[in-house]
């Protein structure tokens, strides 16, 4: 919320993560994995991103789960530099949001493809304000 992430231009992805407990002190993907989180697959860059009136939305996406494990949350993160482009190191990938409760959460993926369907109405993926 400090303006260091530009959702319109940065590459934004979502990962299946298990074993992570949210902390407001965590700023990077490496903080989440360093605190016991295990990434079990990531999406491609979110497509058709848009920010309107403080609401962030994008197309639904898929994640290929690589391990048969339970109780995953969704970690939304900026995988690139602020201007977009290629992925940067996990120590520079900025955390945006953590979803571990709600409809369909936690996720029990098994192995294979998990479809992430974002809400069709507010708050969509994320709402500020």
Image: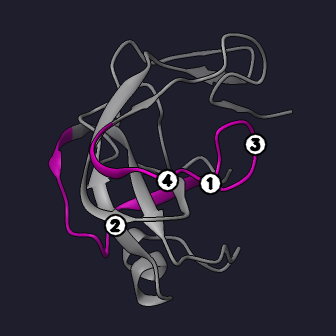
Going from N to C along the chain, the mark reached first, 1 or 2, is 2
Q: Earlier in the sequence, mark 4 or mark 3?
A: 3
Q: Can residue 35 be seen in this view?
A: yes
Q: What label does residue 102 carry, if any?
A: 3
Give residue 39's mark. Answer: 2
Q: Is residue 100 magenta?
A: yes
Which is more foreground, mark 4 or mark 3? 4
Image side of residue 87 versus residue 115, left or right? left
Q: Give the range drawn in magenta.
A: 85-113
Residue 69 coordinates in the image, percent (x, y): 39, 67
Evaluate if marks 4 and 3 touch, with contact meaning CB atoms under 8 Å apart.
no
Residue drawn where x is 47% and y is 37% of the image? 6
In the image: residue 102, left or right of residue 28? right
Q: Distance between the residues labelled 3 and 1?
A: 8 Å
Q: Count the marks: how many? A: 4
Check whether the beta carbons of the residues at disc 4 and disc 1 lie within 8 A of each other: yes
Nearer mark to the viewer, of 4 and 2:
4
**Gap between marks 3 and 2 measured at Cα:** 20 Å
Q: How far apart are marks 4 and 1 (CA)?
A: 7 Å
* Picture quadrant where residue 103 is located: top right
Name the residue carrying label 1. 106
Q: Name the residue under label 4.
A: 108
For label 1, the crowd category at 10 Å Cα-Cα, with few meaning under 14, some 14 to 19 and many 20 or more, is some
Q: Residue at x 38, y 12 (%)?
A: 48
Task: Name the spot of residue 118 as percent of width and height, x first.
Answer: 57, 24
């Amino acid at each position: 919320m400090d303006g260091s992430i530009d959702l319109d231009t940065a590459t934004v992805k979502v990962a299946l993560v298990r074993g992570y407990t949210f902390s407001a002190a965590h700023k990077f993907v490496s903080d989440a994995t360093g605190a016991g989180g295990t990434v079990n697959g990531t999406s491609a860059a979110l497509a058709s991103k848009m920010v309107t009136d403080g609401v962030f939305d994008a197309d639904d996406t898929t994640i290929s789960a690589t391990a048969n494990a339970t109780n995953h949350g969704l970690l939304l993160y900026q995988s690139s530099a602020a201007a977009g482009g290629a992925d940067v190191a996990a120590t520079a990938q900025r955390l945006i949001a953590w979803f571990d409760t709600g409809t369909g959460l936690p996720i029990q993926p098994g192995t294979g493809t998990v479809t992430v369907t974002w809400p069709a109405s507010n708050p969509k993926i994320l709402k500020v304000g």
